[in-house]
Amino acid sequence: MTEQSERDAAAKPLATDAISGFTKANKYAFSLLEGTGNALFDEMLFVGNEIVDRAVAETAIFNEFLSKLAEAHSVRDLGAMYQECTRHQLDFIRRDTERLLKHSQRVIDNTAKLVETWQQN
């Protein structure tokens, strides 16, 4: 009978350690899922705003193109309009590329923060 009690006493710390390990693993998993969910929600909001901003910019460029096209009365005016609209479109592409690079940097920073938070827990 004493051998059985000694085995039970020896098994209790092992069970406690296993439960503690599972609790810690669950805590890490929950922290990672929570952080990932927050990051994804932030990204969805950001992308939605970017889509609206891009649509507004594209509409403004198209309106400007139509306005310039209506003002043009000669081939020379059409050439000037073409050059000006091309310049505006290239400006838009440059701004869009800068926006994309800033967004990529933001995603990398958020991912790094998420991993850092996960490692601290």
Image (cartoon, rainbow, N blue to C red):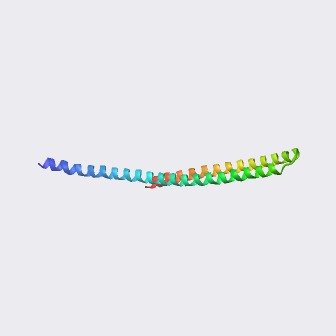
Question: Residue 79 appears at what percent x and percent y?
Answer: 85, 45
Residue displayed at 67% across by 54% down: 56
Question: Residue 89 appears at what percent x and percent y?
Answer: 74, 48
Q: Give the total of numbered labels.
A: 0
Q: Nearer the viewer, residue 4 or 34?
A: 34
Quarter of the image containing the C terminus?
Answer: bottom left
**In the drawing, does residue 48 fall left or right of residue 60?**
left
Residue displayed at 20% across by 51% down: 9
Q: Nearer the viewer, residue 116 or 65?
A: 65
Residue displayed at 19% across by 47% down: 7
Residue displayed at 81% across by 45% down: 82
Question: Residue 46 appears at what percent x and percent y?
Answer: 58, 54
Question: Residue 76 appears at what percent x and percent y?
Answer: 88, 46
**In the drawing, does residue 89 fall left or right of residue 105?**
right
Furthest residue toward left:
1
Q: Nearer the viewer, residue 10 or 42?
A: 42
**In the drawing, does residue 74 fall left or right of residue 11?**
right
**In the drawing, does residue 77 fall left or right of residue 9?**
right
